[in-house]
Image: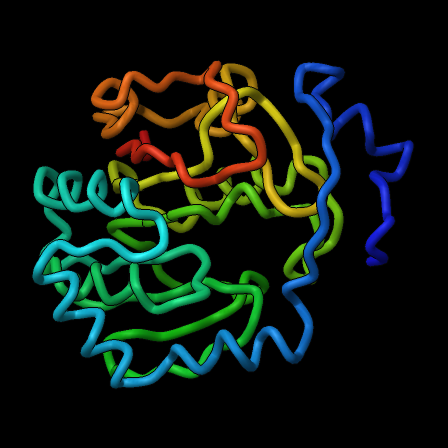
C-alpha cells in the first residue's frame, strides 16, 4: 500500500456507510519487517513479569483511561478459571492482565506472528481454525483496524463488522466480550483506524447483549464528541453472546 493510496472508488460507499461515516486520510504501514521486529522485542518473560507487577498495582499502559475501565470491568465480571481469547496484540499487556485476573489459559489472535514466553499463553493468527469455543473474549483497540490494510490485512469495508461477528462463532453461548474501540464522531481515518459514533458503533455490536459499560457516563463522553484522529478515549463495554 502506497502512502498516497486512497480508498478504491468501488469501496467508498461501503467504507462511508453511504455517507454516514466521515472519510479522512492518514497512513501507516505496521506490517513491515522492521516494525514487527521492534514490536516482538516486547514479548519476553522480563516484560511479562514487569507487566504483572504494574497490573497488580493497577497501573496503566498505553490506553490509560481504558485500563482503569477494564480493571473495574474485570472486578465485576470474573474471568477466573476461564478460557480466554484476546484479539490483537502489539504488547503483552492485556494477555498478562487476563492471567493476573485468574484466566486459566489465554489464546491471542494476531495478524503478525508472536513468540510465546509463557506456557499459559498461545499466539495464533486469524486464518487458523479453532476446535474449541472460549468462555471470554477481550478486544482492546483492535477491531477498528480490521479491513484497512495497516497490518497487512486485505481491504474490506466491513472487516471490523465481520471480525466482531466471527467472535460469536468462537465464543460459547452466554460467553462475555470485553470490548473497547475509539469513540467519537463516526470517522474513518484511512488507513489507520476507525472512530465509532452513533452509526458505526451500534452496527458493530449488533446481535450482542449489552451488560454494562464503563466510561461512557463517568466522563460525560458520548458518541458525538469530536476527538479528531485521537484514539485515546476508549470506554469498555461488556457484552454477552446471546
Query: Quick check: can you spot residue 74?
Result: yes
Residue sitting at x 45%, y 65%: 90
Tell me where residue 87 appears, x and y as whole percent.
42, 55
The quarter in which the N terminus is drawn is bottom right
Query: Quick check: can you spot residue 239?
Result: no
Tell which of 34 and 20 is nearer to you. Answer: 34
Figure coloring: rainbow
Tell which of 126 and 224 is nearer to you. Answer: 224
The quarter in which the C terminus is drawn is top left
Residue 32 picture quarter: bottom right
Residue 109 lies, with reference to residue 47, above or below; the image says: above
Tell which of 31 and 227 is nearer to you. Answer: 227
Residue 193 picture quarter: top right
Residue sitting at x 24%, y 54%: 60
Residue sitting at x 33%, y 84%: 44
Total marks shown come to: 0
Tell me where residue 138 appears, x and y as whole percent.
33, 49
Tell me where residue 170 appears, x and y as whole percent.
40, 50
Residue sitting at x 29%, y 47%: 64
Residue 56 lies, with reference to residue 185, above or below; the image says: below
Residue 203 lies, with reference to residue 191, above or below; the image says: above
Left or right of residue 111: residue 178:
left
Tell me where residue 184 appears, x and y as whole percent.
48, 24
Tell which of 230 and 130 is nearer to you. Answer: 230
Left or right of residue 78: residue 139:
right
Amino acid at each position: 500500500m502506497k502512502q498516497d493510496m486512497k480508498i478504491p472508488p468501488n469501496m467508498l460507499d461501503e467504507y462511508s456507510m453511504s455517507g454516514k461515516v466521515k472519510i479522512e486520510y492518514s497512513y501507516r504501514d505496521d506490517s513491515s519487517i522492521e516494525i514487527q521486529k521492534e514490536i516482538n522485542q516486547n514479548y519476553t518473560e522480563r516484560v511479562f513479569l514487569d507487566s504483572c507487577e504494574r497490573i497488580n498495582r493497577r497501573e496503566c499502559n498505553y490506553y490509560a483511561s481504558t485500563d482503569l475501565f477494564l480493571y473495574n470491568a474485570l472486578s465485576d465480571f470474573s474471568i477466573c478459571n476461564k478460557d480466554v481469547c484476546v484479539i490483537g496484540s502489539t504488547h503483552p499487556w492485556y494477555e498478562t492482565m487476563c492471567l493476573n485476573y485468574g484466566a486459566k489459559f489465554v489464546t491471542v489472535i494476531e495478524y503478525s506472528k508472536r513468540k510465546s514466553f509463557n506456557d499459559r499463553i498461545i499466539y495464533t493468527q486469524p486464518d487458523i481454525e479453532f476446535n474449541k469455543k472460549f468462555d471470554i473474549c477481550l478486544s482492546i483497540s483492535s477491531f477498528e483496524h480490521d479491513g484497512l490494510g495497516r497490518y497487512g490485512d486485505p481491504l474490506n469495508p466491513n472487516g471490523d463488522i465481520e471480525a466482531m461477528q466471527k467472535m460469536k462463532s468462537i465464543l460459547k453461548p452466554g460467553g462475555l466480550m470485553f470490548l473497547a474501540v475509539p469513540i467519537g464522531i463516526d470517522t474513518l481515518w484511512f488507513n489507520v483506524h476507525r472512530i465509532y459514533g452513533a452509526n458505526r458503533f451500534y452496527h458493530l455490536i449488533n446481535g450482542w447483549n449489552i451488560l454494562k459499560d464503563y466510561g461512557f457516563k463517568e466522563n460525560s463522553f458520548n458518541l458525538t464528541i469530536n476527538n479528531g484522529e485521537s484514539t485515546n478515549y476508549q470506554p469498555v463495554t461488556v457484552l454477552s453472546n446471546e
